[in-house]
Image: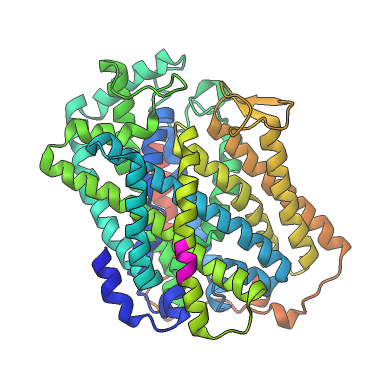
Amino acid sequence: MLGIGWALRRVIRSSEDFFLSGRSIPAWIAGLAFISANLGAQEVIGMAASGAKYGIMTSHFYWVGAMPAMVFVGLFMMPFYYGSRARSVPEYLKLRFDEKTRALNAITFAIMTIFSSGISMYALAKLFELVLGWSFHGSIVLSAVIVLIYIFLGGLTSAIYNEVLQFFLIVLGFLPLVLLGLKDVGGWSGLTAKLATVATNAGFEPGAWTHSWKYMDSPSHNPMGMEWFGLVMGLGFALSFGYWCTDFLVVQRAMAAGSMTAARRTPLIAAVPKMLMPALVILPGMLAIGLHASRGGFLPIGADGQPNYNLAIPMMLGHYLPSGLLGLGLTALMASFMSGMAGNVTAFNSVWTYDIYQTHIRPGQTDAHYLRVGHAATVFGIVASVLAAYSATRFNNILDMLQLVFSFVNGPLFATFLLGMFWRRTTSHGAFYGLLTGTITAALHYGLTLPRGAVPGIKGGFLGAVLHVYPSEMALNFWTALFAWTGCFVATLLISLLTKRTKTDDELRGLVHSLTPRQRDGDMPWYKRPVTLAVGILAVSALLNVIFW
């Protein structure tokens, strides 16, 4: 990883090279980086933890909570992002609305990337502490220094090529773990039998851990505590579209592609391996909880008296892999953590430099000056991530914490983008105050509700009165996102109807769907067209939902 950063340092001559790779990355590289930027600790550790805690229902984060949104961003939103030549998602908001909307999004996004990077640091430090016996604090510092060096040297280009390398390391490292685990428990049928015990011990029907939709008629019938409507609207709509369509961490990879066609195909290429990821990251967690129930004490017990689901992957690695394969598995985990940290830090330094510093603090400086600021922002982002890593110690499933952060930021932001891109009447005041209303709505809902078994504080209920208790942290997150999206959508709509437009149709050309020329793919072979790829992705996703119904 450090070698890639050192080798690429010579091609980083301008701020665009550092922040957007000079818009020269091939589609397949950008596509793998698109998925790898999301394949950090929150994916590997978090999805395995959720697989143990919620079972196969965790697959909804892929087949419902990713595929439709990735298709949508590739077909409909990348033409706006790439065609506008915006250097970041907040800069697109400035072009579409105004400076205050851009600033609000830039600040909330910067905070979100710091927390997300901190989660990766926490997970890596816990891994080293458990498997290698290293100091938790020393492991955090070591991971921070490595990521700092290779981003500082090579910028986004270094991060992207490292993410591609890390993608293959993750696949090679986790495939033996899954195969050995399935062989040990007697294949899928043996795992199903063990998970039936887990389900009945928790008070559910025997198939609650191995069916994704069958028990979603009521929150009390499944371990996630969700009914189908809350899942589809909270995860499948507000959270998933909010993340994949507006999160600069992943959008930045597509914006670095070499052409408009490559940019549109980037999320679609990424969707192909993405839909198969549950086999590598969810199954180990399901295997871990099955072993915990049948053999007893496989997972360590946390301070809350519940199994520490975050340790599912480390425990599986130590249990199944011999020393040689264990080294490969640990390398894969390190790759995922570094990928997540690097992705968040490169997104942070771009947003800080372009959307906050250049715009509000020191405008009109030289390109070399902003390149130096980007380097300084990288250092600051790493240091702030170290501090955020310690807040993750309060959750027994880091994916719960991550989805909470997304519900505050991405939930309302998608409502702003949806109206802004598809309704030209949306005004700047409507967008700003709608975004603010959505974020406040999320805070109010979170502050007045609580997941079952939690005490008021960081997990909710901090406003005093608890008006509703949700069956799980994830259920609370999904409904928080839906409330945030609805609050933002309604407020933006009403305020836009009551205020005047400040942008003419000419200024909105290329930024609003009805004023943007359609992309023509008629000169491409049918099998290379984005629409063909999108249809295939949706069809396979639907089939997977049926298979694991």
Please indicate whether residue 417 sits to the left or right of residue 175 in the image.
Answer: right
Main secondary-structure element of the magenta-colored stretch? helix
Quadrant of the image containing the N terminus: bottom left
Residue drawn 38% across and 46% down? Answer: 41
The image shows a total of numbered marks equal to: 0
Residue drawn 34% across and 22% down? Answer: 195
- Where is residue 527 drawn, in percent x and y? 36, 69
**Which quadrant of the view contains residue 338?**
bottom left
- Where is residue 531 drawn, in percent x and y? 46, 66
- Where is residue 94 drawn, in percent x and y? 67, 72
| Viewer-nearest residue: 399 or 421 | 399
| Viewer-nearest residue: 402 or 489 | 402
What's the colour scheme?
Answer: rainbow
Residue 312 falls within the magenta-colored stretch = no
| Residue interval drawn in magenta | 375-379
- Where is residue 269 drawn, in percent x and y? 37, 63
Can you say whether 38 is above or below 403 in the image?
below
Residue lying farthest to the right in this orientation = 498
Residue drawn 30% across and 63% down? Answer: 162
Specify whether residue 271 is in view: no
